[in-house]
Amino acid sequence: MGTGRRSGRRDQEATNVPEASTAAANAPRSLAEALRARDDVALAALLHARPDLLNPVPGDVTQLATRAGTRASVVRALDRLDRFALQTAEALAVAPDPCPYPVLEGLLAGSGAEDGAARDALPRALGTLRDQALVWGDEDRLRLVRTARELLAPSSQRPSPTGLGPTVAEATAGMSPTRIQEIVAAAGLPATHDPVSAVAALTGLFTDPERMSALLDEAPAEAHQVLGRLVWGPPYGEVTPNPTPPVRWLRDRGLLLPASPRTVVLPREVALHLRGGLAHRRTEPLAPPVGVHREHRPQLVDANAAGQALAALATVEELVKSWEHAGPLVLRAGGLAVRDLKRTAAALDTTEQQAAFWIELAYAAGLLASDGEADERYAPTPAFDDWRELPPAERWSVLAAAWMAATRTAGLVGEQDAKGRTLSALGPDLDRSAAPEVRRRVLDLLGELPEGGVPDPEVVLERLAWERPARGTGDLRARLAHWALHEAEVLGVTGRGALSVFGRALLEHRDPAALLAPLLPEPVDHVLLQADLTAVAPGPLLRPLAETLAVLADVESKGGATVYRFTPGSVRRALDSGHAASDLHAFLAEHSRTPVPQPLAYLIDDVARRHGHLRVGAASSYVRCDDDAMLGEIMADKRSAPLGLRRLAPTVLAAQADPGALLEGLRAMGYAPAAESRTGDVLVARADAHRTPARSAPVPVPDGPPVPDATLLGAAVRAIRAGDLAATAVRKEPAAASAGVPGELPRTSAAETLATVQAAALTGSAVWIGYVNADGAASQRVIAPVRVEGGFVTGYDHTADEVRTYALHRITGVAELAEDQV
């Protein structure tokens, strides 16, 4: 609504007094009346924006208004305002109550036309506050909800974001009448008969621009410097028992008022005059635009993001598989030990912070969990096996969906909580309810740019700070946004900072797998063996090939082409798992596009020739070998001392160590022993992969109550309207003997109740009843009885909007409705 239209309307009201009086009489006198005047659509919009008002559903509009004014609900609503809407609420908190629209406009845009943006944006901000039920009243009598005013108004304990201090009346509340009269006289005002009129005269002086300018013209130059330091806040300053002449001049005339024995405060009226009427030094009516900072070809972005997605799949699979035999222990307080996080980071060849992200991502996707055993460890879940069988694009979709919804925040790992305890990966205190909303909003801003467009990250953070200014949450939202940008890049949702095509599909709730699949390379069925005992995988390998090669060789480097290295230890590992040397030769010959190098063939044969020459079994444990000279060599080796070996026979050594420790000790000495069973057969050392019992993925912690759907909103609005009808319906005046206290349930005798509802059933009219259900909850109802029999009355309940049956003995009383009521 434009300023011209408002001015025209005010001129019309000035010349048409009866019409103005009628408008004032029809203006809402409370928040409940303002809400009652809303249509169903507007009421549903309020409940959608503030879902905490629905728990439980208010019985009527009065209950809704009361709940909308509670401190917890108002704080939550204020926290969800954008910066200019919040600045508007802050201005109303320091404005007169009620506040005319022009006064509010002056507080935000000044008296002139210099801040046109704030002037133009004010109707939108005011509409937001109205929609949120934080402001009510017409344009001539705008009122901020009392709780919001208490939260935003300045006080000595809680400074206002505007930097303004208390009013003259508030600052002089505890001052003696004599001192007030002295200030009035020093300011050049005539004496008054009482302190109230004296404070009013002083307020009138400070709010009169001409007289105030004349008073300040008399002030010393140093006094203007003092005022300049306080004008934009904080408005409090310390003074000595013997203040300087400029401070004394200001204090004597009330331009500074005492707040404590050693503190003075700049009154709000004085600060507003010095500011030119502005409540804020700088208003921010417009959201910072997020534009294109850099631009890449969309094909390059998608290719880069697809590469990151493929690397993410490989990393998560490697992580989870590394925990399937002997996963890390669960700390007593929950979570992962620091040493285990360091070990995992080293295994993944990444930083601890990045390792924490992959661990939390696998946990959020339900691929990792604790096994619940007495010696509790983390291990893969059965869902991991199902996940591995999916095509790569679908596997990525599972990870991306889990990341979008997760409230667990890996960026907090390593920090300390309020009690000084270090937050650990997979620990219990990593949930931040705002994380999914911030993550989605970051991607929404990227999605608003053209394909290939990359924003300036700092501008993105500025935009988020404008949309949801921090009120007590510190820089958490900014940190969440920073982490979201980084995580989206390493996960492949973005590529080179721009949203990928399958990232857009994820954001728009479409299937990203269909768009990602064509961008991923097809798995290959071969490797390239080289003479330096390495193998190069020119792409992702087929699963059987990858699993066998992972046992036979160690990963040396990752990237577009993975490099594997063959070592005596890796070959021995393959032999331990049950493969024979001939099997390994055949495997390499089948899957290599290059001839098997002679050094690799020699390595396999050499390890296989020595493998199993020594036999380790359980005695406690023993070593058996047909070559007694080799056993003598082991006994003579000083490194065998910790094993506690002694010779039982020319070909047998007994050991104090268990078989596992004995195997590891001999391997560390350079031998290749094999374990054997009680019957003397070689044991295959293929460890069974450990799985947890079936586990569901962790449920995200919601940020407040869930947003209601259209069905719930419609039912809630109908219930509130019906309850309001019952609470406000006009009843016929009861007889003097049965008249009750207004607002209480009606009280009538059983005979009178029965007679009234029977008469209503015969005439088809509606009645107002008080009813107490089986749980003892009392309510008011408007019903139209249709049948009364067997101690029950059945009728159409206008409150519930359905036919219901009520027990007559639970009806406290009944009253007929006035003729013009339902």
Image (spheres, rainbow, N blue to C red):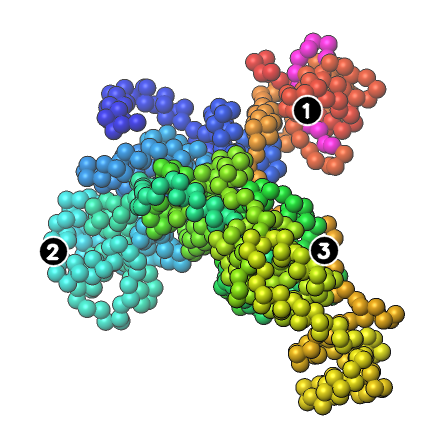
User: What is the distance, in whole Å, between disc 2 and disc 3 at their CAs?
Assistant: 85 Å
768 inside magenta stretch: yes
Q: Is residue 490 above or below residue 768?
A: below
Secondary structure under tag 2 reads loop
- Looking at the rendered image, the disc whose residue lies closer to the viewer, 2 or 3, is 3
Question: Where is mark 2, residue-wise?
Answer: 218
Q: Magenta segment, which residues?
A: 761-773
The amino acid at mark 2 is Glu
In contact (CB < 8 Å): disc 1 and disc 2 = no
Q: Nearer the viewer, residue 272 or 656?
A: 656
Residue at 72%, 85% in the rendered image: 634
User: What is the distance, in whole Å, between disc 1 and disc 2 at their CAs?
Assistant: 72 Å
Q: Is residue 401 visible?
A: no
Residue 158 picture location, percent across and down: 40, 56
Secondary structure under tag 1 reads strand
Q: Quadrant of the N terminus?
A: top left
Question: Where is mark 1, residue-wise?
Answer: 769
